Amino acid sequence: MSQRDRAAAHVPRPISAARGPEPRPGSDQPRRRGRRAPRATAFDLNEADIQCDYVFGWIISGFFSQSNLNKTAVLKGGNALRKGYLPMTRFSDDLDFSTPHELDPDAVLDQLNLVCEYARGGAGIDFDIDRNRLSAEQQIDRSRHVYKYRLYFKDLIGEKDHITLSLRVDMTEYDRLHLPAQERRLIHPYSDADACAVTLRCVAIEEALADKMKCLLQRRCCYNLFDLVYGAFITTEIEVDRAAILEPFFRKTLFSRSPSAARSLLLDLPLDLFRGFWGKILVPSAARLSFDDAVTKLREGISDLFLPISGYRGGEAAFYPSRLRNLILEAGADRKLMAMTYQGVPRIVEPYSLTFKVRPSDGVGQEYLYVYDRTGGRRSGPGLKSLLHYNINALEVLDAKFEPKFEVTLAKSGDADRTGVFRGNHTASRPYGSSRRPMPYTVYCPRCGKKFPRATSSTRLNAHKDTGGRPGPNRSAIAHDVVTRMTPAARVPRCRSMGVGRVVTCLERASPVAPEHRHCWVLAAEVVRR
């Protein structure tokens, strides 16, 4: 048996769980049968700090045993490390799932409610299912979305059932894994581990650590620092193929063009920004380390990780160096203005994006900083401009903030898809249902032909009357019949038939699209069988 298999089979010594007290005779207090409050003595933490970890275990168990998403979705993020690989790593505050397929956000919420019912029956966790909701929708690109859910449950500690807590669950559609997903035994170090046992599908640990390394370059979060250092350079709980971390890292980023640029940026991170937040990370006592030790381990580990390819130092000049990049990311995260001198001209700018672009004229690739120039240059006035790092003579982050005119995408800088031209996309993450302009969406009854506008992606029809005023078919019959939903599709390289069950119409001409038409916006009518 390999070291990885032994680690997968290992289950930590269970921590005892206390059953809530029974109600007094004649009391109106509901029975709390099966409710458990995990004790945190072995972790040297407060029970209140780790009760979400206990609930996460039951949510994961229900997701992979009861949900119809269990064959395609995978667990990612911090809880993939904690619940799939490293029982002594930090406690995460959310669940991240992803799937390679399209998601119906309403159907996902139904499945999460089903999982909550499972956790209620198995552990007595009192979920407020009526409050569970889709709280936000984040658009990653033209086709992919992250749906953010909130699940509510009553406090598990003592008599505090009047306090309602919430969990965050994120679901990403059309997500791509670069290493095969792994099947792992759920790590649930509590006394009801046998009842909660399940085999889960999670991202490979090497890809999870590659994500953490990528996020360190993009977002200033101390959780990513701890996860990378502990998982890649400290832990002995599982065998990690460190060389395999670089492969998905280079596929997810633009730095396959210049590994030395990635190494330099990682070694020059402004890590002192994390020092004041380090003590807030919830870590079992056996895995705690000081901030200075973590920084030392990171720099030693990154140097060793990139050592086999350190001889090639080409391409560094194509990327913004750390002395400028760190300031730009700081300004973007805080929405602060920057004062810069560009080609000898002082300017006040709003930072928006770092995008890699290959010039058609000579085939040279460069990373461009897209800013809104409030001042103007020698030959042009204020406006959206792209800047090269070697023309920046001075750069400073100001205290004054700005209201973004476009979506700020600096947190995605270095991603493999950050190529081309920044066009000032106005779409940003927003609370679900609060769109300034509702997405055009129509469903129609296939029996009577009547159309109904929709603000959500639901295709269920209520009882209705046809265009002649006669009663339409009942609700249940329609819900299981064939309906057609019409959704706006993304810009395509060439207008063409989109396959069986789809109709493509050129919106510019309101007629069937000729094959020679390029770059038209299309409307796809997709037949969906419920």
Image: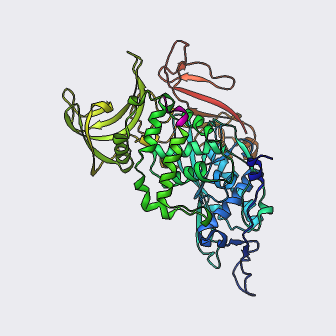
Quarter of the rendering occupied by the C terminus: top right
In the rendered image, residue 48, in percent from the top left (x then y), is placed at 60, 71
Q: Main secondary structure of the magenta part?
A: helix
**134 or 169: nearer the eye?**
169
- Tell me if residue 206 is in the magenta stretch: no
Q: Is residue 500 visible?
A: yes
Q: Identify the residue shown where x is 37% and y is 35%.
A: 320
**461 or 160: nearer the eye?**
160
In the rendered image, residue 351, in percent from the top left (x then y), is placed at 34, 40
* Bounds of the magenta segment: 307-311
Which color mode does the image show?
rainbow
Residue ranking furthest to the bottom: 25
- Tell me if residue 309 is in the magenta stretch: yes
Q: Is residue 254 visible?
A: no
In the rendered image, residue 303, in percent from the top left (x then y), is placed at 50, 42
Q: Identify the residue shown where x is 41% and y is 31%.
A: 316
In the rendered image, residue 307, in percent from the top left (x then y), is placed at 53, 37
State left or right for residue 429 relative to residue 449.
left
Location of residue 349 with respect to 311 vertically, above or below: below
**73 or 364: nearer the eye?**
364
State left or right for residue 110 relative to residue 213.
right
